[in-house]
Amino acid sequence: MQGLLHFLLRFLVPLICAVIIVAVVPLVAGYIVLMERKVMADMQARLGPMRVGPHGLLQPIADAVKLLLKEDIIPEEADKLIFWIAPLISVTTAMLAMSALAIGPWFQIADLNVGLLFIVGIGALGIFGIVLGGWSSNSHYSLLGALRSAAQLVSYETAAGMAIVGGLLLAGTLSTREIIQAQNDYGVWFGFAAPVGFFVYLVASIAETNRAPFDLPEAESELVAGYMTEYSGFRWALYFLAEYTNMVVVASIATTLFLGGWLRPFAGTPAFNFLDYAPSVLMLAVGAYCFYRAPKQPVKVQQLFMMVVGLGLLLVAVVLALPLTSMVNNMVPGLKAGLHGAFWFLLKVGLYLYVFMWLRFTFPRYRFDQLMRLGWQFLIPLSIINVMGIGVALALHRHWGWSNWTAFPLTTVVTLLIAGWLGWAGEKKDKQHVFVGEI
Amino acid sequence: MVDQVIFHFFAALAVISAVLVVTRRNVVQSAIFLITALLATAGIFLQLHAEFLFIVQVILYAGGIMVLFVFVIMLINLDVSLHQVQFNRQWWLGLLLALVVGAQLVLAIVIGESKVSFGAPAPPTALEPSTQLVGHVLFGEYMLPFEIASILLLVAMIGAVVMAKKKI
């Protein structure tokens, strides 16, 4: 009996988590697309998708069905096998990278002791999907997109890696679970202790996921659709799924390392314990708004659907409120940590994705030489200096007994000064001669 | 039992893809099989509980170096290489040499197996997190060789840039 229980806990729970991830991530990706369209519409003073379901809530499902039913076209001169496999590589690696993420203390497939490196490394393999897909299409647009993508990823991977090293120096471990625990022990999220590292990671992660303003691999004004020009139907959808899954992955890395993972804001301060009610109140507010909007929908079915959505949100609010009562908390210990942890983690990931979209709709696209210069001449030196700065701050704290509150701000200010100098020197150099990119 | 199956799977994958790297005519396909071979080796590292080595293999070789390889390959005109003859007149000499080296390896393993005794494999629970150990060894005991290797790589890189680019 004991052995069976142990076996189940060891193999069945991770298996269930894995199935949940594989089943839910495509749906989530679809709704991130909807969220993106809605955010874009909001910023451009439009309404966005409104037809399918109330406020376009069923649009992702309609899109998925459409893509599944489309004809799958393979170009005559394409390298068929690689053309087939390439989208699969992208999706598989993106999904695999999610396996080491800790979404709340309860939900994790595997707590690897190289967790964060695993996520970064496996995520980086997804580039082969893009590069091989672009090459095998046997089209100039695709090939150019693939080349740009490879050059961009190799450049920004370095900056992102060094930015992560900055956070890891503080945590002293690579396991996602222990990194979040370390932030709990410090009492501060590493994003505040190492703001420069967080900034570098933010920029580099946008470039790595090929998002605007760094979306040169699929720049539609120059390359039709870049590496996926020749793809259609479901294979094209797979690339899209991979891109959005990768966004979730980089957002989760940033959340884990810099934004405190599943920790509530001010987790260690009893004065802020009222924030425990925030998840329920938030869900309650959104649910109530759904009910308020429901009678204003044009069609009866949509009114009903809106009601159902509102009811669902109220149910979530109740579930999130349950662990706050002492009775339930005593019955299932750890329920609050599990549920609320997942809530805060997903909220932070959502906010990070919102920043992605915000930047996408407010910045114009970079030129390729600008992109390369930003990566190599600004971000990489900055991230290396940041690592040195954090090292100095840690040494000052541990060996010379400085307080954390003086050591970290001091080194951050020094790093920022050097960053300013880097930017200023780069600008001065630009004025002397104009560099024209070769790709 | 399961360990055996997993090991033989990765080992067979590594060997078969290594052979295919050499025999494929299409360079891109060769590159893909090289990636497979490297990943299979990484899998063997993982099975040996060398997690750090596993992930370094994936990030550096499969993720970094191979991306550059593929990047360069895509710039080459493949039609030329597809029609080139893969073997020249000295193929039998190469084969002979390969057989001799192979025989040498087999001999070394057969003789060595009786001379060297391997300890019993450590139980998986007794192993410490390897990342920290690697770090301590690399930046403590082997600090000097590690730094010399870094400088050597830096020199090679600068040398390549200087040779390739006349005006910097």
Image (cartoon, rainbow, N blue to C red):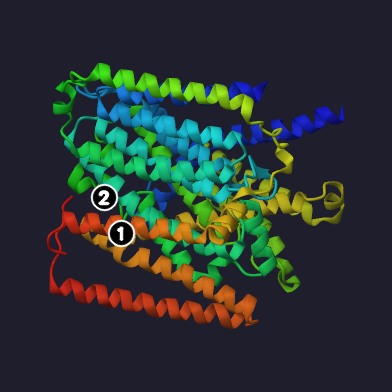
Q: How far apart are the two marked residues, 2 and 1, measured between alpha carbons?
A: 33 Å
Q: Is residue A341 left or right of residue B103?
A: right
Q: Nearer the viewer, residue A77 or A245?
A: A77
- A78 relative to A251, above or below: above
Residue at figure coordinates x 43%, y 30% from the top left: B37
- Chain letter behind tag 1: B
Q: Name the spot of residue A222 as percent of width and height, x first.
A: 18, 47
Query: Are there few (<14), some (14-19), or many (20+) residues within 10 Å of tag 1?
Result: few
Residue A51 seen: no
Q: Name the spot of residue A207 as percent of width and height, x first.
A: 35, 54
Residue at figure coordinates x 37%, y 75% from the top left: A419
Marks 2 and 1 on same chain: no
- A121 relative to A129, above or below: below
Q: Residue furthest top?
A: B92
Residue at figure coordinates x 58%, y 46% from the top left: A101
Does the residue at mark 2 contact the one at mark 1 (Cβ under 8 Å)? no
Residue at figure coordinates x 71%, y 71% from the top left: A272
Q: Name the spot of residue A360 as percent of width and height, x first.
A: 34, 56
- Residue tagged 1: B155
- Chain letter behind tag 2: A
Please state which amino acid type lies under the numbered disc 2: Leu
Q: Is residue A228 left or right of residue B9?
A: left
